[in-house]
Amino acid sequence: MRVLAAMSGGVDSAVAAARAVEQGHDVIGVHLALSRMPGTLRTGSRGCCTIEDSMDAQRAANKLGIPFYVWDFSERFKLDVVDDFVAEYQAGRTPNPCMRCNERIKFAALLERGLSLGFEAICTGHYASILEDGEGNLELHRSLEMAKDQSYVLGVLNASQLAHSMFPLGATASKDLIRQEAAARGLSVANKPDSYDICFIPEGDTRQWLKEFVPTDSGKIVDSQGNQLGEHDGHVGFTVGQRKGLRIGTPAADG
C-alpha cells in the first residue's frame, strides 16, 4: 500500500513511519510547513513545526531510506487553525487548535492531496487505534498507552477519513518503549522532548498573544448574586466552568 507518512520531526511520527516501512508499505515522508515565518512557531519541549523540526524529520526519513518532501500548508493553516482560534475566543469560546488541525489540515487538506496523488493512507504518530466492529465498521479507540492517548483530538474524523488513516503506535504500552525503539533504529530524535502547548504562539503566553487580535477590556468579576469578587483584564483569558486565572478562592456552596 502507498502510504504518506506525516513526519513532524518528533520521535512518535518517526517511529510510526519506521513501522509502516517495516510492514512492507511503500512509504513517502512529508513534513508540513505551517508558517511562512517558521521562527514564529515553537519547537523542542514546547512546540513543533519549525525549521529545526523539518530538518529532524528529513534526517529520520534519510535513516529509514524513504523519499521526503516538505509541503507548504501555511495559508490553509492560518485560515483554518489560527484565524479560527482567534474567532473562537472572540465568540467567548475556548478552542482546541490541535483538534482543528487534525480535522482541517492533517486529515482533510493533507489527506485530500495524498489521495489525489495516489496514496492510499496517511500514517501519523498519534496515540490511538482503529478497530472494526462486528459488522466491519471502523471505530476509533483509545491507545494502549493511556497517559499519551490522543483519541480525543481525533474524534472529529469521519469513517472515510479513518479508512485512510494509520496509527502504528496505538498498541504500544508506553512512550518509553517508543524512545527505546527509536534509539535501536538509530533515529536521532529518540530523546527529543515532547511538544506541548500551542505551536503558533511563540512564547506560550496565549493571553498576551491574543491581545494583538482580540480587545481585552478590563472589568469586574461578580457572582450570581451580583457580589464583586475581583477584577479581570480581559475575558479571553478565561474558560467557562473553570476558576483558573480568576485569582479568587471562594469555595462552592455546600450541597
Image (tube, helix red, strand yellow):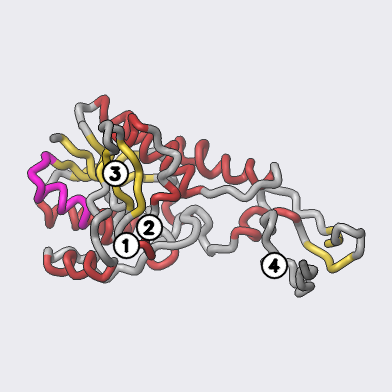
Q: Secondary structure at mark 4?
A: loop
State yes or no: discs 1 and 2 in contact (Cβ < 8 Å): yes
Q: Please report the bounds of the magenta region as a residue range.
A: 15-26
- At label 3, counting other C-alpha atoms closer than 10 Å, the crowd grade (few under 14, some 14-19, many 20 or more) is some
**CA separation in Å, label 1 and label 3:** 14 Å
Which of the numbered marks, if any, corresponds to residue 149? 2
Between circles 2 and 4, the one closer to the viewer is: 2
What residue type is disc 4 on?
Gly
The disc, 4 or 3, on the residue closer to the chain's N-terminal end is 3
Among the two numbered marks 4 and 1 on one chain, the one whose residue lies closer to the N terminus? 1
Question: Residue at label 1?
Answer: 145
Q: Quadrant of the N terminus?
A: top left
Answer whether residue 246 is visible to the viewer in this image. Answer: yes
Residue of label 4: 245
Task: Give the residue drawn at x 70%, y 46%.
Answer: 92
Q: Which residue is mark 3?
A: 130
Q: CA distance from mark 1 to mark 2?
A: 6 Å
Give the left or right position of residue 188, taking residue 49 as reference: left
For the residues labelled 4 and 3, the Cα–Cα distance comes to 38 Å
User: What is the quadrant of residue 238 in the picture?
Assistant: bottom right
